Amino acid sequence: MQTVKVIGAGLAGCEAAWRLAEEGFIVELYDIKPKSFSPAHKSADFAELVCSNSLKSNDVYGNACGLFKEEMRVLGSLTMEAAAHSAVPAGGALAVDRDKFARFVTDKIKTHKNINVICAEVSCVPEGPCIVATGPLTCGALADDIAARTGGGLHFYDASAPIVSAESIDMSRAFAGGRYGKGGDDYLNCSMTKEEYREFYAALMSAERAELHSFEKREIFEGCMPLEVMAARGEDTLRFGPFKPVGLRDGEGKSYYAVLQLRKENLEGSAYNLVGCQTNLKFGEQKRVFSLVPALKNAEFLRYGVMHRNTFINSPLCLNADFSLKSSPETFFAGQITGVEGYVESAASGILAAIHLSRRLEGKPSLIPPEKTVSGALSRYIAAENSDFQPMNANFGLLGAAETGIRDKKERYKFLAERALKNIREYKDSICQ
């Protein structure tokens, strides 16, 4: 059996290692844990979810990320198996207990007969068949070697939200329930009056940030924009975003000026994540500002929000749509370092890179998923000529939503999803031949 190296045991690396091992290859999976950790990682387990514990919407027919997850299930995703095992209530979203999720993946990887886990720091891209999935925090000698091979790295800034203990939430100012009554009681809603919101907003705008310099707009990925950066666009910006009160009413039918939602961090509900509150404020400032939300006036912060620089390569210049390096056909990249953005997107790229490397080693041509699937569209996005290449999430625009001619959005998305699922099932059949 042939040996393949996978560098990095994050979501993409674990998916790639699992796929290759299941196909009969011997996999050497390299990761620096537990000898050392990146600035954003704390757990010794693999596939650690650093920012949010949400894998976004579960709506297959109305949300592109929900559709993408279903495509991954069709392709046999380890991430989706782990998510099903560790899911926590989150309305229409797929959220997980991040410790149970990572432990499940780690156990699967470490007990697979074809995977050898090697705890070591890799300083250069290895020769021979390999998948580099070292993530957006790749640094040191390896980052320098990747930059030399790919023409330099690009970057943006990413942020995570604070987590508070459940017992410290003032439930007299919070109520359970999903937006428009959907999702049962999966979220806690922290209500705010107009005066309370304005006091919070003023404190947020005057709070001191962890970084002394300001970040240029182009360096901040829109999907993980810090709350204070978003709020600087105007006083009501948050009320049309993460603090949107629309569709949320308490048990007495009362609505509020603004609502901060909290989502369970673990299955037992002992910790809650401040939804949409990614931030770069100093830790002391986070406590001061978020404690102005009435339900959080005595909140115990189990983790403060942090911001870190993410690096990705200029994929259109150096990668093919099968995630292989143009200058080295047996070297593949996967994960956020390729310019796909998000947990789901990162994991899916690991599956795809493994499929393509497997075919390459078996003497078969690359077979890119159909362009009308999210898998295929995102694969083509990272390889298409683009002078202003930026990270990309799954979205229906990639599937040609505007070209369907269907005016009703719900029906349009349903059509796109049904077509994509038909195509991905046909793709699965074709790569199994």
Image: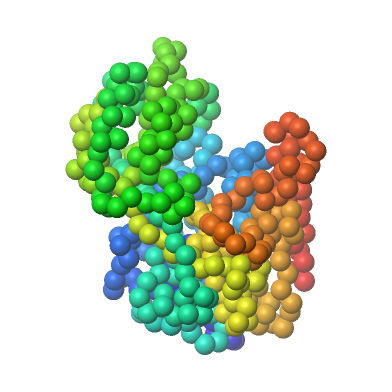
The residue under the point 38% across, 42% down is 229
**For the N terminus, which image quadrant?**
bottom right
**Of residues 217 and 284, the one drawn nearer to the viewer in this rendering:** 217
**For the C terminus, which image quadrant?**
bottom right
Colouring rule applied to residues: rainbow
The residue under the point 25% across, 29% down is 292
Q: Position of residue 55 (x, y in %)?
A: 50, 48
**Of residues 182 and 386, the one drawn nearer to the viewer in this rendering:** 386
Residue 102: in sight, yes or no? no
Q: Quadrant of residue 189?
A: top left
Q: Position of residue 203 (x, y in %)?
A: 26, 32
The residue under the point 49% across, 23% down is 246
Q: How many marks?
A: 0
The residue under the point 60% across, 82% down is 327
Q: Position of residue 223 (x, y in %)?
A: 48, 46
Q: Is residue 173 above or below residue 384?
A: above
Residue 417: in sight, yes or no? yes
Q: Is residue 211 above or below residue 366?
A: above
Q: Position of residue 422 (x, y in %)?
A: 76, 52
- Quick check: 226 left or right of 397? left
Q: Is residue 59 above or below residue 4?
A: above
Residue lying farthest to the right in this orientation:
405
**Of residues 103 and 215, the one drawn nearer to the viewer in this rendering:** 215
Q: Quadrant of residue 117?
A: bottom left
- Quick check: 234 left or right of 423? left
**Of residues 67 and 324, the one drawn nearer to the viewer in this rendering:** 324
